[in-house]
């Protein structure tokens, strides 16, 4: 091989066809010039992983990936040259190899092309997540074996320079590994998520909050703080669908106190007259007469009509 990397790539291609994966192992250098004299490439299941001490708060155990496999190749530097040769080769494995039909799922076989990345980004603009894009791409190329990728390989990307947008795909392990895509606009720090929680409830979802936290934002942008969730929600002017002011909020508290006092006085009068039928009839005549007087004035709205007030409060028609 003309270079060391050519030798490493040769063994990686051999492993891909044979049904296993590789990893780089130890290296030996010459003392005279510091060049790599020996390079070991081994099967990714070489050796045994050190057994960690189980902790009481450990929720998930790491899978066993090392099986003491001895398959490897040794590349040796030729004296006075920069070329490398295969110095030793061990073929046998201590574990089953993957079949050709599933070889494209191996880590070294997953490599998104520029066309695949562009396809995923275009779909994200239409709120199509990475998993659905993966399935659609499979139909275009004729099958999963022609894709050289998996849905997990598109978690991080697999920027849109012309629009100054960063797209981040998150895996929610607490909810059956659901995937959510967040489009983060870097100019104004606004974001949209495929879970649509903000559009439904007016509350930013944890996916948007995670992206903003990773960007180092100390507080939410003002656009995400809706009036309905603040203490000043009831102090804002309220209008009906015709644009008419429902009530003057500047003296709302004073009016509420008067209404409360009036209800108290009414209940007091009723309780005092409840055992005297004549008093009740006189009180009913007074109430009915005042009611007719109010109706004759017109343009009065009953306080029980809360629908229009709620529409204004919730920022939606």
Image (tube, helix red, strand yellow):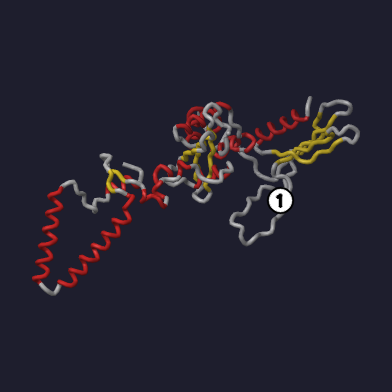
- Quadrant into which the C terminus falls: top left
Instruction: Write the residue at 43% across / 44% down.
Output: 198
| Quadrant hosting residue 316 | top left
Which sits in the foreground, 235 or 167?
Answer: 235
Q: Position of residue 52 (x, y in %)?
A: 69, 56
Which sits in the foreground, 35 or 16?
Answer: 35
Which element carries disc 1, helix, strand or loop? loop
Q: Is residue 47 left or right of residue 142?
A: right
| Quadrant hosting residue 159 | top right
Which sits in the foreground, 278 or 142?
Answer: 278
Q: Is residue 194 above or below residue 268?
A: above
Instruction: Write the residue at 85% across / 36% down.
Output: 29
Q: Is residue 100 left or right of residue 141?
A: right
Instruction: Write the residue at 75% across / 37% down.
Output: 41
- Residue where numbered disc 1 is placed: 49
- Quadrant into which the N terminus falls: top right
Q: Is residue 113 above or below residue 217?
A: above
Residue 83: tell me if it is visible. Answer: yes
Instruction: Write the residue at 14% across / 57% down.
Output: 290
């Amino acid at each position: 091989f003309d270079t060391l990397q050519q030798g490493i790539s040769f063994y990686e291609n051999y492993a891909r066809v044979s049904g296993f994966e590789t990893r780089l192992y130890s290296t030996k250098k010459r003392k005279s010039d510091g060049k790599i004299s020996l390079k070991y490439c081994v099967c990714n299941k070489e050796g045994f992983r050190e057994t960690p001490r189980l902790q009481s708060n450990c929720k998930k155990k790491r899978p066993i990936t090392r099986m003491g496999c001895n398959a490897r190749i040794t590349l040796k530097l030729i004296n006075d040259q920069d070329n490398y040769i295969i110095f030793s080769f061990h073929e046998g494995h201590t574990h089953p190899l993957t079949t050709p039909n599933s070889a494209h799922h191996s880590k070294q076989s997953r490599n998104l092309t520029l066309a695949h990345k562009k396809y995923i980004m275009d779909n994200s603009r239409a709120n199509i997540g990475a998993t659905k894009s993966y399935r659609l791409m499979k139909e275009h190329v004729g099958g999963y074996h022609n894709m050289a990728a998996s849905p997990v390989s598109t978690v991080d990307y697999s920027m849109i320079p012309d629009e100054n947008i960063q797209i981040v795909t998150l895996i929610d392990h607490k909810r059956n590994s659901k995937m959510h895509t967040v489009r983060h606009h870097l100019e104004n720090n606004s974001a949209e998520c495929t879970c649509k929680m903000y559009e439904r409830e007016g509350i930013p979802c944890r996916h948007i909050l995670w992206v903003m936290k990773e960007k180092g934002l100390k507080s939410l942008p003002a656009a995400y703080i809706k009036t309905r969730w603040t203490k000043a929600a009831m102090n804002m002017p309220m209008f009906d669908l015709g644009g008419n002011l429902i009530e003057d909020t500047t003296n709302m508290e004073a009016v509420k106190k008067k209404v409360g006092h009036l209800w108290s006085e009414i209940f007091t009068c009723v309780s005092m007259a409840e055992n005297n039928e004549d008093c009740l009839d006189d009180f009913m005549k007074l109430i009915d007469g005042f009611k007719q007087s109010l109706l004759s004035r017109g343009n009065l709205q009953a306080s029980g009509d809360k629908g229009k007030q709620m529409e204004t409060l919730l920022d939606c028609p």
